[in-house]
Image (cartoon, helix red, strand yellow):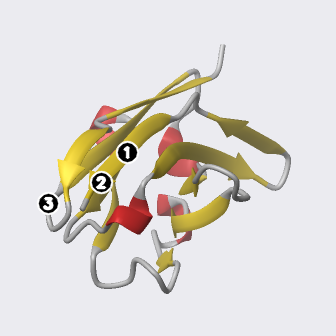
Amino acid sequence: QVQLSESGGGLVQAGGSLRLSCAASGVILRFYTAGWYRQAPGKQRELVAVISSSTSGGFTNYADSVKGRFTISRDNAKNTVYLQMNSLKPEDTAVYYCNARTSAFDTWGQGTRVTVSA
């Protein structure tokens, strides 16, 4: 059974940091493109950061709104993808979702809530 489990969300003051984790089971995550998405209340889900599979070079890409503040990374030994979030802003408040995909496969975690207070 394929499962992505996010953790690390919580309440933080503006300017603070959080690290989100996405632990995978049932898939070898390094073979997948992995991404973090977020959905704020009343808004559509949006891409935050993505990292290509390790076999494709592990290239990263970020939404303009988080460039320079967020970093996506992998730990293949732990089958986990991380999102380090620094200099958090109230507008970063959202539920953050992990995604793993190939051309023929697409799966999501259940989400972890991040709340940034002013």
At x 45%, y 69%, the residue is 58
- Residue 99 position within the rendered picture, expressed as x and y whole percent measured from the top left: 61, 46
The residue closer to the viewer here, 2 or 12, is 12
**Which residue is label 1 attached to?**
114
Disc on res. 16: 3
Of the numbered discs 3 and 1, the one sitting upstream in the chain is 3
**Which residue is label 2 attached to?**
116
Label 1: state its secondary structure: strand
Label 2: state its secondary structure: strand
Can you say whether 105 is above or below 62 in the image? above
Give me the C-alpha separation between circle 3 and circle 1: 12 Å
Can you say whether 39 is above or below 27 in the image? below
Are the residues tagged 3 and 2 within 8 Å (C-beta)?
yes
Q: In the rendered structure, which amino acid carries the disc numbered 3?
A: Gly
Are the residues tagged 3 and 1 within 8 Å (C-beta)?
no
Are the residues tagged 2 and 1 within 8 Å (C-beta)?
yes
Label 3: state its secondary structure: loop
